[in-house]
Amino acid sequence: MYRTVGQLDLLTLVLAIVFPEACTRIRLPNDSIKGRPIYAVRLGAGGGSKRGILIVGGTHSEELMNPDAIIELLFGMVLSYVQGTDIVLGNRRWEAAEIRLMIDVLDIWTVPCANPDGRDFVMTEDDLWRKNRRTNPGIDCKGVDLNRNCEILWGVVQDSHTSCDACNMAYVGSGAFSEPETRNIKHLLDTQRIDTFVDVHSYSELVLYPWGHAPTQTTDPDAQRFTGLPTGTCAPIGRPGYQEYMTPRDEFRFQTVAGRIVDAIADVRGRRYTPEPGRDLYATTGTSKDYAYSRHIANSALRKTYGFTFETGPFTGDLGESFHPKDPTLIKQDAKSGILALIQQTICAIEFIGVTFLGRTREADALGAVRDDILMTTEPGRGWISLLERVEHRVLAVVLADEALTREATILLERAGALLENEGAVLDEEIVKRGLVFLDALVARAPMGMREDLERVRPQLEQAAGSSARVIVERLMRVGPQTTTKG
C-alpha cells in the first residue's frame, strides 16, 4: 500500500536516470540520525536563474501518504512533459501545456521523504510515531518533532503543541536546527532560489500560511515583530495580546494563493479545504512554513519565500486511518492538485520575460513596486492584482507558444518600464495601438474563461494614450476590473 524508504529512493533514482535533461537527484548534505541518505529531486528544464518552489513531504513520520503523492506527482509531470498528455485528477484536468510551462520556467525542488528513519519506524514498529529517531541524552524518550525545530521563535512553547519535554511528541530538540533532517531544508533554502515553500502534512483538510505563533496584524511593523522576542525560553511569548506584523501585500498574497489552492483541490471531487493562518488551527513555533517566510525579515539580504503547509485528508475519528488510510488514492489526488496550483502560482510572467529576453529584472521590479506600494492600497487596485495573478501563467503559455507574440510582449514590457522611469513621459498612441493588437491576439488564442478577464483590460488600455504612468495608475486605483465584452 505505502512505499518503503528504499522504494521511494529507488523511484527518485529512476526519475534522474530516465529524464536527465530535466530531472536531477542530489544527496543532501546531512544524512538522517540513523545514517540514511536523504535526497532532493529538482524538476526543471534548462538552466539559468529561475524562480523556484520547494515541496517537502514526510516530515512527520506517521503521515505516510504525502511522500507517495509527491513521488507520483513527479512521475505524472515528467510523463506529461515527455508525452504531451494532460494530468487528470478526478474532475480536474491539468493540461499538458500548463505542466510544460511549469517545468520550463521554474525549478521545482522536492524532498519527498524528509524523515526516513521515522517513516521506517512507522512501517515496522509504531504506526503513530511522529518525530525523528534521535536518542536524547539522559532519558529514554526518543525523537525530535522536526516541525518545531526551525529557527523561528524556537523553544517558545505554545500550549501543548510545542514542548521542551523530550517525552512530548512536539519536542523542540536541543536547539534550533539541531536535527540533520531540518538542516537539509535550511540548506536548500540557503543554496537555491526558493520563492515558494510547502510542507505537506496530514490531516484536517487545511491550507495554512503564517503566522503560527500569534494572530496577524498589518498596521504596526515596529513594535510587534518576532525578531524582538526572546527564544529558547521554554515559556510562552509572555506579551498579552501580542500580534505578529505582516505587510498588507503579503497577507493579501497568502490569502489569494491559498484560495486558488482550495479551488484546485475542490475541483477534484468537491472536498473544500479551509484556508487560514496557522494560528487559527493552534499556536506553534519553530515550524517550517513560518521559518521559510520569516527568513527575509530576520535577514533583509535573504530572498522572500512564501511558506505554506497543507494538511491533507479529513479526521475520520481514528488517528491511524486519518494519517494513513487504507486507500489514500482520492486524498492523494486532492494533494496533487493543490501542489500543482501552488507550483502554478509561483510563476511570474513579467519577471520571466524580462530575465529571458531582456536579461534583467528592472521592468519587473518597477512594476512590482507599483503593485505592492500603490495598487495594494485600494480595493480596485487589489482587483487588478488579483486579475493579473489569476491569468499571468496562462498568458505566458500563449506568448511563449508564438515567436511573434514573444517579441511583442518583450517590446511592450520594455516600453512600460521606460514609462515608469520617466515622470514626464506619456504613453503615445502608437504603443496603445500595439497593445490593443497584442490584446486581440491573446484573446483569440485564450480559453473562454481567460478571455473575459483579458477583455476587462481593454477599456483602461483604450484610455491610456497621452497619459503619464502616474495618471494611468491613479485611474487603476479608482476603477477596478469591470466585466466588459468587445463590441
Image (cartoon, rainbow, N blue to C red):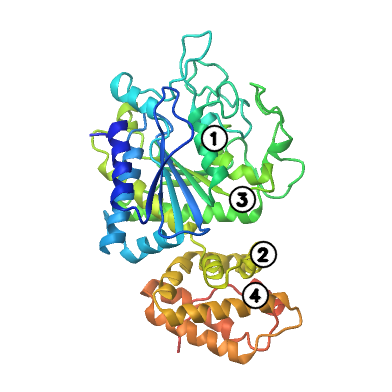
Q: CA distance from mark 4 to mark 3?
A: 23 Å
Which three-letter amino acid code belongs to the residue tagged 4? Gly
Q: Earlier in the sequence, mark 2 or mark 3?
A: 3
Q: Earlier in the sequence, mark 2 or mark 4?
A: 2
Judging by the rendered image, the residue that carries numbered circle 1 is 287
Q: Earlier in the sequence, mark 3 or mark 1?
A: 1
Q: Nearer the viewer, residue 132 or 262?
A: 132
Q: CA distance from mark 4 to mark 1?
A: 39 Å
Which three-letter amino acid code belongs to the residue tagged 2? Ala
Looking at the image, which residue is at 57% across and 43% down? Answer: 190
Q: CA distance from mark 2 to mark 3?
A: 16 Å
Under tag 1, what secondary structure?
Answer: loop
Tell me if residue 354 comes above or below residue 76 in the rendering.
below
Which three-letter amino acid code belongs to the residue tagged 3? Arg
Judging by the rendered image, the residue that carries numbered circle 4 is 417
Q: CA distance from mark 3 to mark 1?
A: 18 Å
Q: Nearer the viewer, residue 309 or 35?
A: 35
Q: Earlier in the sequence, mark 4 or mark 3?
A: 3
Total residue callouts: 4
